[in-house]
Amino acid sequence: MEAKKGSRASWGWSSLLVGRDTLKLGIGWKLSSRVPNAEWEGRNVSSIISRNSWKLGELHNCLSSVEGEYKVKSGYQIAKKTLKSVEVARPSSSFVIPKGLWGAIWKLKVAKKVKHFIWRLCSNPLPSMVNLFKKRCLENASCPICNMEEETSEHLFLFCKWTEMVWFGSLFCARWNRFEVKRMEEWWSDLLIGVAKVDDWVASLFACTCWHIWKERCKAVFDNGVVDVSFVIQRSFSAAAEFWSVNGFDKCVKGNNGCSFKGWLPPSSGVLKVNCDAAFDESSGVAGIGVLVRDDKGRLVDGCCIRAKACSMNMAESLALKEALGICLKLHIDTCLIGSDCLNLVTVVNQMDVNWDWLCPGIMKEILLMCGQLCWPSILHIKRIGNKAADWVARSVVRRMCPMDWVLFPHPLWCLFCLLILRVQV
């Protein structure tokens, strides 16, 4: 224990000397007549004897194991209890991944392979160009699709030109801010457990979209193909909808009040269904109006989107119903169903009451006049969950994000809603 390190000490001997201080913490001495040196003064058997009896408590403390033999495990336990951990100063991220994120990922209502992929995406072991470059597998880390930026996970899934088209053309109609999204795990943390937490269905759709973005990227890289934005949008939605349908998740959707209700229901064969909705921006007084005409297969027959000035939400809903009736007159539709999610408006129209809102008596008179010209069509109240498509159009119009030719070239969203229609019919 008092040996010194020589000038040419072996690696094994040097290692023993480095751990000598730890050995001293748990080492024991055999009984002998040797007089201890100053370092071991006071560590005698006599110190644990009191009036012809042993101080068993102190005796047990002196022994690191029951057998009285030194073991690596006992040495590790002593070192862990007594030695102070050395803190090494190193740069750290300002974002700490919450522990709840991993549990939220495994609770996603998607296929297991998609869950595992999202876990890999957040822990960042995916073979992106940047990660391969860091491992010295590549000489260039630029994106193989756009060749404009390095292919980080954030660029690949959110900010590459083609993935921006995927997110904007999907059900989310989203554009991500580069200054707000810094890390993928932070982005997913906000979606699953943060302030921007989404419901189970939206989270599933997010996961499936990321999964199919990755598959399409790999297909383009390894097969020298071209990325197909429309295919990614449609395949992501259909994959999520199929998984929910197989597992019975899409039988009904629960609202905040606990009641259950179905989605968009198709009309009878040969009958057209007209859905109308409005979105109102109170700060600017701008209303967005969306009207959709669909057949019994869910195919888009006609529609319109209009930006208009309004004084209230009631006026915006009245304008939407007026436009829906106007389309019916223009198309000379004899048999149709008109649906609105504004219960009060549907009630007063069916009661032929023009005094519903003092701000829009003129609009109400025009609505009743059109109803008379159409021989009083069926005007029904539908739940909001069944009016999602018209609501999407109305909100997009307010944000000036709805294409002008969306009726002639329907947004992929309409194809996706057809899948839901088939689910409901089944």
Image (tube, rainbow, N blue to C red):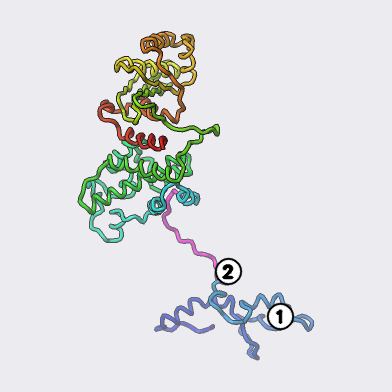
- Badge 2: how crowded within 10 Å, few (<14), some, or many (20+)? few
Region of the chain picked out in magenta, as a range: 77-96
The number of numbered badges drawn on the structure is: 2
- In terms of image quadrants, where is residue 395? top left
> Is 260 located above or below residue 35 in the figure?
above
Q: Is residue 85 magenta?
A: yes
Q: Is residue 42 left or right of residue 203?
A: right
Which quadrant: the C terminus?
A: top left
Compared with 116, 48 (above or below) is: below
Q: Residue furthest front?
A: 269
Whether residue 367 can be seen here: yes
Which one is earlier in the sequence, the residue at label 1 or at label 2? 1
Residue 368: image quadrant is top left
Q: Nearer the viewer, residue 298 or 170?
A: 298
Secondary structure under the numbered disc 2 in the rendered image = helix
89 or 323: nearer the viewer: 323
Q: Amino acid at mark 1?
A: Ser
Alpha-carbon distance for marks 1 and 2?
Answer: 23 Å
Q: Residue at x 36, y 19 (%)?
A: 335
Residue 295 rendering spot, x and y as whole percentages? 33, 27
Q: Nearer the viewer, mark 1 or mark 2?
A: 2
Residue sitting at the far bottom = 33
Q: Amino acid at mark 2?
A: Thr
Question: Dot 2 corresponds to which residue?
Answer: 82
Viewer can see residue 168: no
Query: Residue 174: x percent and y percent?
Result: 35, 36
User: Horizontal placement of 3 versus 168: left or right?
Assistant: right
**Mark 1: secondary structure:** helix
Q: Which residue is mark 1?
A: 47
